[in-house]
Image (cartoon, rainbow, N blue to C red):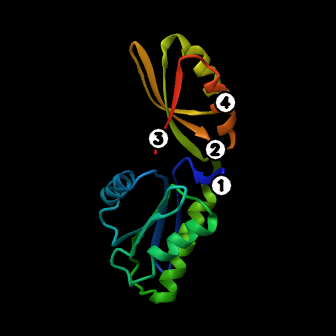
Amino acid sequence: MEFYNTIEQSANAEFKERGSRFIGYAYPVVSADEFKKHLQQLKKEHAKAVHHCFAYRIGIDGNTFRSSDDGEPSGTAGKPILGQIDSKGVTDTAIIVVRYFGGTLLGVPGLINAYKTTAALVLQVVPTVQKPVLKHYRLHFDYTRMNEVMMILKQYQCVIFRQESQLFCEMEVGIPLSRLEEVKYKIDALLNVEILNIV
């Protein structure tokens, strides 16, 4: 897999069912900690809401995920939200649905439908983007090689995560999997430039 789908901006959408208001928020996230900040912020903004249900999936392998019904009957909120993230085929994505109770109980099928619909609506308004899968490397080189290294990184849309320049330069970079062999070949051809695999 050389590319993956995700979202790059946040969005929100609202769904109403028999007096209850469901407000869905989508966020791009790369860690559980980042997600928690969004959840805490929404709990402050919507302090009077009865539920803050959510789901997220993080990482290219999709193995990092979580869902919560936040007091709704088991399986009626978090799972339907996660189901929408998965059916859209996105990762590094979180959805939080805030519910204001309208006085009428919706029952299990009604709740599942409301959370599923809200998650689907918010994913319809936020654009999906395709990003390259990156392989992480550390570069170690003489600072006189900086321009040549930067030209290669720019040419192949590599991402620089960290950079330190003293007598020698050290960089942590992400190289798109689809261009990996070309980039490694070009960097190997430079004098005094070392490329190290980050496991």
Which residue is labeled 1 in the image? 1
Give the camera-side residue of 163 and 92.
Answer: 163
Q: Residue at x 61, y 17 (%)?
A: 148
SS class, disc 3: loop
Residue 133 location, x and y as percent? Answer: 60, 47
Give the camera-side residue of 156 and 118.
Answer: 156
Which residue is labeled 3 in the image? 198
Dot 3 or dot 4: first in sequence order is 4
Which residue is labeled 2 in the image? 177
Cα gap from disc 1 to disc 4, whole angstroms: 21 Å
Residue 37 location, x and y as percent? Answer: 34, 52
Residue 143 location, x and y as percent? Answer: 49, 13
Using the rendered image of the protein, determine whether residue 8 is visible from the camera's viewpoint: yes
SS class, disc 4: helix
Q: Give left or right: position of 164 versus 151.
A: left
Q: Residue at x 54, y 60 (%)?
A: 61
Cα gap from disc 3 to disc 4, whole angstroms: 17 Å
**172 to 43, vertically: above or below:** above
Residue 199 location, x and y as percent? Answer: 46, 45
Dot 2 or dot 4: first in sequence order is 2
Residue 69, picture quadrant:
bottom left
Sort mark 2 into few (<14), some (14-19) or many (20+) by Cα contacts within 10 Å: some
Residue type, numbered disc 1: Met
Cα gap from disc 1 to disc 3, whole angstroms: 19 Å
Which residue is labeled 4 in the image? 185
Cα gap from disc 2 to disc 1, whole angstroms: 8 Å
Dot 2 or dot 1: first in sequence order is 1
Residue type, numbered disc 2: Leu
Proximity of marks 2 and 1: CB atoms separated by less than 8 Å: yes
Sort mark 4 into few (<14), some (14-19) or many (20+) by Cα contacts within 10 Å: few
